[in-house]
Image: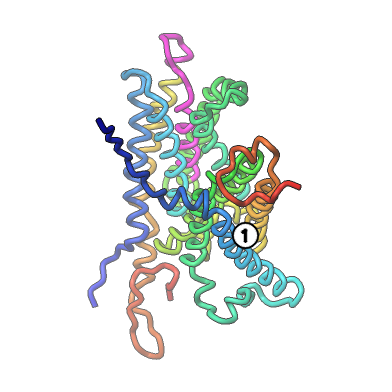
Amino acid sequence: MLTVPVSIGPLILRVALLAAVPAIAGFAVLRGFVPEPGRAATATIAASAVGAIVLELMLSAGLALPPQVVVLLLALAAAPLWLILGRDERKARVVAFGRMAAPWIVTAAAVTAFVAFGRAWPPREASESLLHTAIVFALTGLSWFTVCRPTGPGLASVALRVVATTLALAVLAGTAYAITVRPLERSAAHNGPCPIHGNNVELGTDPARMC
Amino acid sequence: MTAHVHHTPTPAPGLLSRLNTSGHRMALALFTFVVLAHWAEHLVQAFQIYALDWPRPQAGGVLGLWIPWLVTSEWLHYGYAIVMLIGLVLLRKGFTGRARTWWNIAMWIQVWHHFEHLLLLLQAITKSNLLGMPVPTSIAQLLFPRVELHLFYNAIVFVPMVVAMVYHLRPNESERAEMRCSCAMATT
């Protein structure tokens, strides 16, 4: 039986993640050099960031965070989408507050992400969950960057762009690393022929059926 | 001299239009039956766990006793969630005023419930469970157990649906004036 050490399901998720992350990172890097994007573009990027976080959660074996915090982090990452799409006048004050708080949330998420990236280095057994945690924080920060308005040559505006650009490049590199040094090799190693009733039975690459 | 008047035939109303006018009553009755049947299954499942003290994997409701594999299929759960969402969207236009507001609330909660089931289905298909869990796990399942969570989801979709239907059956004057279906009870 011919088997290849690739599971189609996780592969599709990885391809989707590899499509989403460069788009999100590209938005953050290029934002200072192109005209201010419209509502549809920013909403697409914010939605992509939330989608990328969900893909990260599906591809990771766990984060260095309690599950309750993961739910809160997802809600935090999804909030910019609500702020961008909210047209209701009654929500105007909440939207204005969200936009005002956005640069601080980007900065806080960036600091947390960089600390987690730092702790994940050098690569060891505990690095995997730290790396995925860093990516999730970085994507949350980039999701909030969509509602920031870093216009003008002011120092704060330039600093925010620098933070977002650095975060974007870090998430791009981190994601590429996380999905190439993936647990697939482990599953493939486990998924060799399994002795069942004295016969070697090929179980494919389904991690749920590891012997 | 004779005048020729050309009458353009009125196009027959489409399915969506009929569902929200002449067929609204029947469509709502059918939809309510489906929703109630599904909710009854969740209640039976809760009864099996809490009253009969069955182990959770064995508590599959009535359908689970008959076709156990079907109840464990994420396709079945997703199928129901999407049918429910389609029903809420398709029948929405027939509601007016307060009834529309409550129906919208039910619809938006179902949108989230549907996302949760979509995530569960994706995990089952790709065999990549959230955070490396042993079984497909939705986001809110990180906080609450599955049986109770989905019983709760179905309850919080069903309650605003019922409120919407009550307002729809007993509309005020302005709501009645906007209605294009025959669902409203006659005024006395």
Q: Position of residue B124 (x, y in %)?
A: 45, 64
Question: In front here: B8 or B136?
Answer: B8
Question: In front here: A146 or A170?
Answer: A146
Q: Examine the image and state in which quarter residue B6 appears.
A: top left
Q: Residue at x 48, y 62 (%)?
A: B79
Give the structural element (helix, strand or loop) at label 1.
helix
In this orientation, does residue B116 appear? no
Q: Examine the image and state in which quarter residue B173 appears.
A: top right
The figure's colour scheme reads rainbow
Task: Locate residue A144 relative to residue B143 in the image: left or right.
Answer: left
Task: Locate residue A196 relative to residue A84 in the image: left or right.
Answer: left
Q: Position of residue B18 (x, y in %)?
A: 47, 51
- A49, above or below B42, in the image: above
Judging by the rendered image, the residue that carries numbered circle 1 is B150
Image quadrant holding the N terminus of chain B, namely top left
Total labels: the figure holds 1
Task: Locate residue A94 relative to residue B93 in the image: left or right.
Answer: right
Q: Residue furthest front?
A: B1
- B146, above or below A154, in the image: below
Is A135 part of what is drawn in magenta? yes
Q: Residue at x 61, y 74 (%)?
A: B60
Q: Chain of mark 1?
A: B
CA neighbours of label 1 inside 10 A, class few (<14), some (14 to 19), many (20+): some
| Helix, strand or loop: magenta stretch | helix
Task: Locate residue B47 relative to residue A34 in the image: left or right.
Answer: right
Q: Position of residue A153 (x, y in %)?
A: 41, 9
Which segment did they paint magenta? A133-158
